[in-house]
Image (spheres, rainbow, N blue to C red):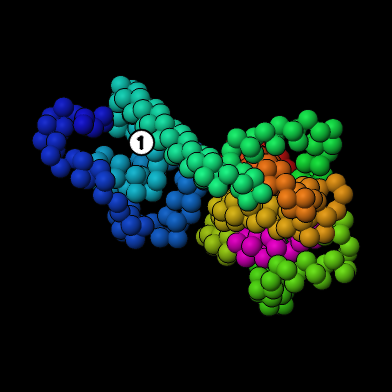
Amino acid sequence: MRVPWRSDKANATAASSGAARREEKLSLAQIAQIVGLPEERLAQISQLIASGTLPEEQMGPMVHMAHGKGLETEQIMQMMRSLGVPEDRIARVLASQGLATPEQVRAAEEERRRANRARLVRKAFIVLFWLAVWEIADRVVDNRLILAGPIRTIQALVEQLAQSDFWMICLASTGRIALGFLLSFSVGILLALVASKVRLVREFLDPLMSLLKTIPMVSFIIMLLIWVGNQALTVYLSFLIVLPLIYINMLTGFDHVDKQMLEMAHAFGLSPWRRFMYVYRPAFMPFLLSSCKMSIGMSWKAGVMAEVLATPKPSIGKEMMEAKTFLATPDLFAWTVVVIVLSLVFEKAFMELLKRAARPMGGMLGRKD
């Protein structure tokens, strides 16, 4: 296959070994040794690339610096692939530094589109395969008290959608779980910020967070039922389950702040707010993004479990419990689908907001506070 950013002569001489080099991956330690950057800094860059929050405008100077150190274009491409940069972005960044032509960029983007189409077809085939297996299993069992296939589940879901209180139930459950998650998100960030500054606070919070991580979820539910009742149980449980994860990851992010950047910010007289935005924020955002991606799913699992046991009104958990009581398996599967859809929508929306907050804001440095 033609490598789009090599010359024809280079393609002719490297045809036999190009594919092998294309698949070869470099470790962070190898890349750090080649470019002369700390491995921790490269790990942060890799996390930003994986989360899609590192703009091409910032990749350009890095590529220019690597090229200025005598690295060949192929070596730079190999390092960028090892860090997880997509092929089309590699081509655009190289073009911005005069290392690739517009035709090569278009070829890379066309290759990316073909790869995306193939990936979508493959995913669709896999989903259809498992739906078919699910439906066949339902037909073989042929007992709606035990199993409901996708057709029966869709029928039950349509019936639930026709109910007048369907959206009220979804909104109530989403509101409780979202409130618990947002509380843990805010409190976890504030506690981590204080703990990173005050050693004594950190020492007092460490055993508490370890305890919250190890207490079984059922114990939380029983205790909270006694303390706060069934209506507020979902909020408190989501808060307690997610808080340690947000706190620990944020604390790790604050610990990874570049000390030299802090000294530079102090030397230039940046205000505390600007230091937070331009020094601390780039350091902790990769950790915050990864922790939120995990904790949102945990908050939904914990929240729905709390609703099933506490049955607050209205709630999805109460509807699930009623479906179990009356052996309405299709309804149980339908509400499970609703939970999956709501959690995915909430995760996509919240992660998009976080990615926007992680974008570079260097253009605002020259403005007044």
Stretch in magenta: 234-250
Q: In the picture, which quadrant includes the C terminus?
A: top right
Of the pair 272 and 303, the residue shown nearer to us: 303
What kind of element bears circle 1? helix
Q: What residue is shown with label 1? A: 87
Of the pair 84 and 134, the residue shown nearer to us: 134
Q: Is residue 21 left or right of residue 125?
A: left
Residue drawn at point x = 70 percent, y = 37 percent: 156
Visible in this render: residue 126? Answer: yes
Above or below residue 254? Residue 326 is above
Of the pair 74 and 99, the residue shown nearer to us: 74
Above or below residue 81? Residue 205 is below
Above or below residue 245? Residue 76 is above
Residue 68 at x, y = what percent? 30, 43
Within the magenta stretch, is there residue 245?
yes
Residue drawn at point x = 45 percent, y = 60 percent: 40
How many marks the image carries: the answer is 1
Residue 62, by quadrant, is top left
Residue drawn at point x = 26 percent, y = 49 percent: 24
Visible in this render: residue 336? Answer: no
Residue 183 at x, y = what percent? 77, 55
Q: Is residue 199 left or right of residue 164?
A: left
Give amino acid for label 1: Glu
Residue drawn at point x = 73 percent, y = 68 percent: 218
Residue 72, by quadrant, is top left
Main SS class of the magenta portion in the image: helix
Q: In the picture, which quadrant includes the N terminus?
A: top left
Residue 261 at x, y = what percent? 54, 56
Within the magenta stretch, is there residue 62?
no
